[in-house]
Image (cartoon, helix red, strand yellow):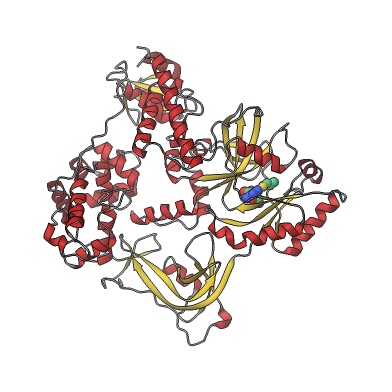
């Protein structure tokens, strides 16, 4: 493809992708399948890889991430990011109102109320309509430049819509992980044996500071905008500013309200007290702002916070109820989770009967005893938490709780792995929930996608002794299924057909499906593409495993051990015989030329025209090879800005040619 053709195609793909994105995110509609959408995006990524200079600054490919940031640059905020004063009672709020009235010398004023979103604040800088920087709050004066990660958040416009947009402005908002995403993420982590995250806020904050923006993209962070800053913005009220940023394409929570009096503010607070539980994110209060910007300016700031705004914090909703007992759940990976069985009690709109207790440490920390009256709180999470014991109500006869030492499902002695809080049942192959859990993992949509098989059917087949490992699925016969409750001719045929169809599932998904600890969907994909076949993976040494992208010590060890287990080897043989795919059909980016044919490169530092991973793709696309370290075999070291001195020294010592980015670009011309 010539550059002219590429430019045309890139524009066409960009328009098409933007159209479908908008349809999906703004109008909740789709016109093409996920697969078709992915194909468009993949084509654009490849084209941009081949012609980096043609990449548009607001290209939708930035939403998928791919940049690795070793360190984030520290940036000084143009306007310091202050915090808000907190109030906890009507009285304190009326005091605030009194101060505002006094400050404005009894001029009339209005308030603008918003919910206080419990996430991570972000400062977004736009120049000539384009997002140029996303910076965390940091210490309020300086924050971290997390632009690459911010670009993956779809509710943050890369380019603002509309005419007459100021050439420079800043929008602030709250980045958050929606409750549903948080639960999905934790389920996924539980599924591959990783410890779960404690709460959505910290997870959002940790995600925003991850080094690999492609992982950030998968986390589906979201953002509500609530503040516009800049010079000559042409608005007189906060309300107008909010409407303006909304029209520019920012997402604003529709929960705001203009209030004329403090009594109206109090009604707003009361209105949202329980309703906020139904919102997609966690909120911990209400922010009350003086609406008129001129009045805001006159009220000004104290050293820490504005005098024109305040936060009202909701009290955590908590009740006391009796702890009737503790039950223990065993998951697919053998992890044991204790659950508090409570005397049913009404809390924030629902009846609570159970609450999660996380692990043995948590029970010890709370010093829980059966029969205690415990405080139960509903935070943002859907499952309530036990936060403490009402000691005044404790009867002296209650005995300290002993954590179970044996698996409640199979009686095997529990173990605790070094550095982990959870207890595990080590009886992987004989413990019923672990056996059934492995099959449920295997058939799930993201894995083999056998949707004609559900949890109940798996249980029945397991109880009949017909299903112990995924490979048994492919030995099932019609007679086996017909004896199951609820199965007739058609449903049996569908189930068998679903199983047969699943043999076509690509190797990437099969590798995820077999359930190796710590091997989630992404890692499975990388491993499959790196090793190409299951045989190569099974025989890989630990060093070879460590060479694969995304694989560190822990994953390498887990995969290595799994591949050496005789039972796993047998299972893979059986699955192979059943016709499953154990070879990746993924094709590397198409070759553009062979001008770098046979030459090897190491890239170091940062570049003007390429992201670091991108320059590697360009080398491969032009027939070159990318090596990870400087050695005698190397042909060229491409030196970017801030290249490590050690690499340069080594290359100089070995007499390896060091070239600049411009020289590299010259080479591409052949
Ligand atoms: S306005 C000058 N509005 O609360 C202060 N902040 O304690 C401007 N927050 O750092 C902030 N929801 O992260 C504002 N609707 C909202 C908010 C909000 C949450 C956070 C924000 C800020 C902190 C202040």
Whether 488 is drawn above or below 585: the answer is below
Residue 240 or residue 135, whichever sits in front: 240
Residue lying at the far right in this picture: please name it.
105
> What residue lies at 21% left-to-right and 50% top-to-bottom?
498
Count of number-bearing discs:
0
Splitting the image into 4 quarters, where does residue 634 fall? top left
Residue drawn at 37 percent across, 23 percent down: 618
Residue in the image at 17% along x and 48% along y: 500
Q: Residue at x 22, y 62 (%)?
A: 429
In the rendered image, the vertical position of residue 129 relative to residue 76, given as above or below: above
Q: Position of residue 257 (x, y in %)?
A: 68, 51
Q: Is residue 151 left or right of residue 404?
A: right
Q: Residue 645, image x and y in percent?
A: 46, 28
Q: Residue 529 placed where, x, y %? A: 27, 37
**Quadrant into which the N terminus falls:** top left
Q: Is residue 259 above or below residue 648?
A: below
In this rendering, is residue 291 above or below 585?
Answer: below
Residue 34 shows in this picture: yes
Q: Residue furthest top?
A: 670
């Amino acid at each position: 493809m010539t550059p002219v053709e590429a430019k045309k195609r890139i524009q066409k793909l960009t328009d098409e992708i933007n159209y479908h994105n908008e349809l999906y995110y703004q109008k909740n509609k789709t016109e093409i399948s996920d697969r078709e959408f992915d194909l468009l995006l993949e084509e654009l990524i490849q084209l941009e890889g081949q012609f980096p200079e043609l990449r548009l600054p607001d290209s939708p490919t930035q939403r998928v991430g791919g940049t690795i940031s070793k360190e984030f640059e520290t940036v000084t905020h143009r306007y310091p990011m202050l915090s808000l004063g907190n109030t906890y009672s009507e009285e304190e709020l009326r005091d605030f109102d009194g101060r505002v009235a006094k400050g404005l010398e009894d001029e009339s004023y209005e308030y603008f109320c918003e919910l206080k979103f419990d996430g991570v604040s972000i400062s977004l800088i736009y120049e000539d309509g384009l997002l140029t920087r996303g910076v965390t709050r940091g210490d309020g004066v300086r924050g971290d430049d997390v632009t690459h990660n911010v670009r993956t958040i779809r509710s943050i416009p890369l380019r603002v819509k509309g005419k007459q947009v100021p050439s420079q402005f800043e929008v602030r908002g709250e980045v958050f992980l929606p409750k549903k995403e948080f639960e999905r993420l934790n389920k996924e982590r539980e599924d591959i044996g990783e410890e779960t995250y404690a709460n959505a806020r910290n997870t959002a904050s940790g995600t925003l500071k991850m080094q690999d923006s492609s992982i950030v993209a998968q986390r589906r962070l979201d953002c509500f905008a609530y503040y516009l800053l800049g010079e000559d913005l042409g608005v007189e009220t906060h309300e107008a500013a909010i409407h303006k940023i909304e029209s520019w394409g920012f997402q604003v929570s529709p929960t705001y309200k203009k209030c004329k009096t403090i009594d109206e503010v109090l009604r707003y607070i009361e209105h949202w007290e329980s309703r906020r539980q139904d919102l997609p994110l966690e909120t911990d209060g209400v922010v009350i702002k003086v609406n008129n910007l001129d009045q805001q300016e006159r009220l000004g700031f104290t050293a820490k916070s504005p005098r024109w705004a305040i936060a009202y914090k909701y009290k955590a909703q908590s009740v006391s109820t009796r702890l009737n007992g503790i039950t223990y759940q065993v998951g697919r990976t053998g992890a044991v989770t204790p659950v508090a069985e409570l005397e049913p009690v009404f809390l924030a709109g629902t009846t609570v009967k159970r609450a999660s207790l996380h692990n043995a440490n948590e029970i010890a920390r709370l010093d829980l005893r059966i029969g205690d009256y415990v405080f139960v709180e509903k935070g943002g999470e859907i499952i309530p938490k036990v936060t403490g014991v009402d000691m005044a109500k404790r009867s002296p006869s209650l005995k300290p709780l002993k954590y179970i030492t044996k698996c409640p499902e199979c009686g095997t002695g529990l173990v605790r792995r070094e550095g982990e809080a959870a207890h595990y049942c080590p009886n992987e192959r004989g413990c019923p929930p672990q056996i059934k859990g492995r099959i449920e993992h295997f058939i799930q949509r993201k894995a083999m996608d056998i949707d004609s098989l559900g949890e109940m059917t798996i249980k029945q087949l397991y109880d009949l002794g017909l299903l112990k490992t995924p490979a048994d699925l492919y030995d099932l016969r019609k007679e086996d299924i017909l004896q199951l409750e609820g199965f007739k001719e058609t449903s049996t045929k569908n189930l068998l057909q679903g199983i047969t169809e699943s043999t076509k599932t690509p190797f990437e998904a099969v590798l995820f499906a077999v359930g190796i600890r710590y091997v989630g969907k992404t890692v499975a994909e990388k491993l499959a593409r790196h090793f190409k076949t299951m045989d190569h993976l099974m025989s890989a040494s630990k060093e070879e495993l460590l060479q694969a992208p995304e694989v560190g010590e822990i994953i390498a060890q887990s995969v290595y051990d799994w591949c050496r287990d005789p039972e796993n080897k047998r299972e893979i043989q059986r699955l192979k015989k059943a016709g499953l795919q154990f070879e990746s059909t993924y094709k590397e980016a198409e070759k553009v030329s062979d001008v770098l044919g046979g030459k090897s490169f190491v890239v170091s530092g940062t570049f003007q025209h390429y992201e670091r991973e991108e320059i590697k793709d360009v080398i491969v696309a032009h027939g070159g090879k990318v090596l990870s370290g400087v050695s005698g075999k190397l042909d060229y070291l491409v030196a970017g800005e801030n290249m490590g001195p050690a690499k340069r020294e080594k290359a100089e010592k070995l007499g390896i040619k060091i070239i600049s980015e411009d020289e590299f670009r010259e080479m591409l011309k052949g």
